[in-house]
Image: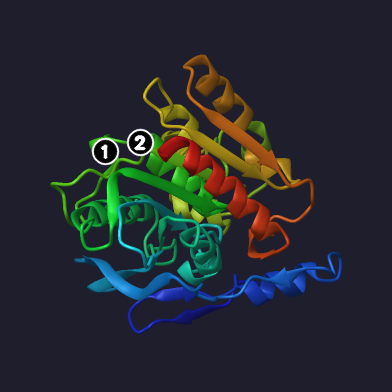
Amino acid sequence: MAQTKSNPSFPVDTSYTLNHQYQKYKKHFPYLIPARDETPSGVLDERDVVYTTIENTKFGKRDLHADLFRPEKEGKYPVLVLVHGGAWRAGNKSLLVPMAQKIAEKGFVTVAVEYQLALEAPYPAAVHNIKAAIRWLRANAEKYNIDPQKIAITGCSAGGHLASLVGVTNGLEHFEGTMGNESFSSSVQAIIDIDGVINFLAPASLNIKRSSKSPDVQWIGGSYSETPDTWKEVSPIYWANENTVPFLFINSGYSKYHAGQDELIGILNEFGIYNEVHKFNVKMHTFWLFHPYIDGTVEYMADFMNKIFK
């Protein structure tokens, strides 16, 4: 059961943590080693940098933060924005810090972002937050040694869905929000979806029994029968077109988390848009949190971005 506690200003679901996932899987996968927060040599580390301040929310004004990692050596580097998972309701940016550190070591600026979860603010708040973070990065490209023409986005599980939705809606005002640096673009040049749903209307997703307390129902703001247009709107596949950027999909052995992916790949191929699919054939959803899977995941991601950016 989800555990909810009160922040000074807003409710927080604390049920999704690295330790929780380790306890869940270690009996069946005794070889797992949790990935740890360890900044590599040669990588600069800046934590809890404020990227925007949210105004006029029902829980009051507050800051949103990001953790940044970048090569110590001077230069202009591609950047990867990382969006954590947790069923749109739980989790925090620290879950993707080990991944961000490993990718920064390979010559990228990496930015793990905080965003508003369902208990604080349902859709579209998270999308507006993440796009604001991308605009903030462009506004501060010189400060953080970022090449503003080379921005990729990734996420895991619900974060993978959000990364895909943010990426396929490049340039669409409806999804932008007004959370700062509006004169800068929120567009990305590549998308990496790690076990994140692509189509909420696909049978593998829509046919799952839900209650009013289901995380997706809470985040979307109603069941499919109540809000069918919104269920379609938040499905990345319906925004894919000839201008969609290259895609990398990294999958677990659970097909339900890839709902709509095959159809999206068909669309990408029809338009001649570069895409890759890699799969860890293991019945473990949060594989990216553990060794040995985090290492292969990072290799797939870095290889893909090197193809697109270098």
Image coords of residue 29 (percent x, y):
83, 65
Q: Residue furthest top?
A: 270
* Quadrant in which the N terminus appears: bottom right
- Give whichever of discs 1 and 2 has the lower sequence position: 2
Image coords of residue 269 (percent x, y):
54, 19
Contact? badges 1 and 2 (CB < 8 Å): yes
Q: Type of residue at label 1?
A: His
18 left or right of 215 in image: right
Q: Residue furthest left?
A: 183
Q: Which residue is mark 1?
A: 174
302 left or right of 220 in image: right
Q: Residue sitting at 74 percent across and 47 percent down?
A: 280
Residue 170 falls in which quadrant of the image? top left
Say which element carries label 1: helix
The residue carrying pointer 2 sits among few (fewer than 14), some (14 to 19) or many (20 or more) residues within 10 Å by Cα, namely: many
State how many labels appear: 2
CA gap, disc 1 and disc 2: 9 Å
* Quadrant in which the C terminus appears: top left
Image coords of residue 134 (percent x, y):
30, 52
Residue 60 falls in which quadrant of the image? bottom left
Q: Type of residue at label 2?
A: Thr
The answer to whether residue 59 is above or below residue 81 is below
Which is more toward the observer, 118 or 166? 166
Q: Residue sitting at 35 percent across and 74 percent down?
A: 46
The answer to whether residue 15 is above or below residue 107 is below
Which is more toward the observer, 233 or 309? 309
Residue 289 visible here: yes
Say which element carries label 2: loop
253 left or right of 194 in image: right
Q: Which residue is mark 2?
A: 169
Q: Residue sitting at 41 percent across and 45 percent down?
A: 152
